[in-house]
Image (spheres, helix red, strand yellow):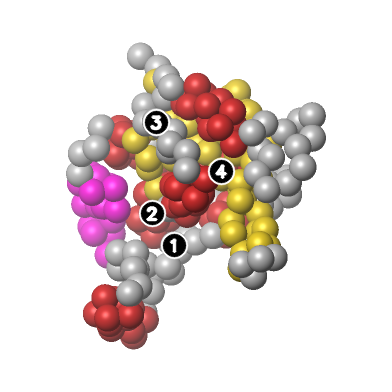
Amino acid sequence: MESWLAVVDVECRHIVQKKKKNKIMAFRELGCWRVTLPLFRLSEPTLIRLADGIAAAPCHRTVSEGLRALTEYTSAARAWGSWGPADLCHMEQRCAALGITVPALPRHLDLQAFVLPWLLHLGLVAPVSDKILRDREEQVRRAPARGKRFRPLLPEAPALKTALRALGVAVEGPLHHGLSDAEGAARVLHVLYERCGAPFLAAIEAALCGGGATYQLPLPLAGAASSQD
């Protein structure tokens, strides 16, 4: 039975508030692609342009209308994914600043963190040195006193363009464009499925069901990796 994952890219723009003399991250556009399982086929691209802090053009929607369109687009999806956690953070922070409700989207999947162990297994990403990890641990230890938050300790997660090139996928379309960035993230999933097959699909299924750690390889592939060392 087919199901699908919505891959979304949230693009923002900096807007300077003259009276407060600071910058805010306002919505610019939302790019969406459908990735149909189990074969990871890409379809139904959608671009939602938003008039947030700028004069509206005919192609723009209000923020509320745009988020409503995103909710409708993802309503039948098992989850929505983005390259890294920033898209979800931007959405939550901007909605809070505007005093509007965060859209009721399905489960969120950090695709950058999810694909990292697979890229490591294929030898496409170099593990981080022990020194960098020790420095990171020290930063995390001091973070509460400085009022900062840090992501979990992981090897260096690649930028989307880096992951595409490592997989031999041509970078098409402009960077930092909602539709092309969402397509790039979706293509990373498609190529990893072509290379890794059933174990990669099983890991996606487990992540979509909320089971297990999304940063670990499934046992068959992890065992194969250790037997080759």
Residue type at the position of mark 1: Ala
Q: Position of residue 136 (x, y in %)?
A: 33, 78
Q: Determine which residue is flagged by label 2.
A: 113
Question: Label 2, label 3: how many angstroms apart (C-alpha)?
Answer: 23 Å
Q: Determine which residue is flagged by label 1.
A: 157
Residue 96 within the segment the image draws in magenta: no
- Identify whether 192 is placed above or below 198: below
Question: Label 1, label 2: how many angstroms apart (C-alpha)?
Answer: 7 Å
Residue at figure coordinates x 64%, y 70% from the top left: 21
**Mark with earlier residue (3, 1):** 3
Q: Residues within 10 Å of mark 3 (few under 14, many from 20)?
A: few
Q: At numbered mark 4, what does the secondary structure look like: helix, strand or loop?
A: strand
Residue type at the position of mark 4: Asp
User: Which one is in front in this view, the residue at disc 3 or the one at disc 1?
Assistant: 3
Q: Determine which residue is flagged by label 4.
A: 9
**Mark with earlier residue (2, 3):** 3
Q: Determine which residue is flagged by label 3.
A: 104
Residues at discs 1 and 2 in contact (Cβ within 8 Å): yes
Left or right, 36 with reference to 222: right
User: Which one is in front in this view, the residue at disc 4 or the one at disc 3?
Assistant: 3
Q: Which residues are magenta?
A: 213-229
Residue at figure coordinates x 48%, y 27% from the top left: 71
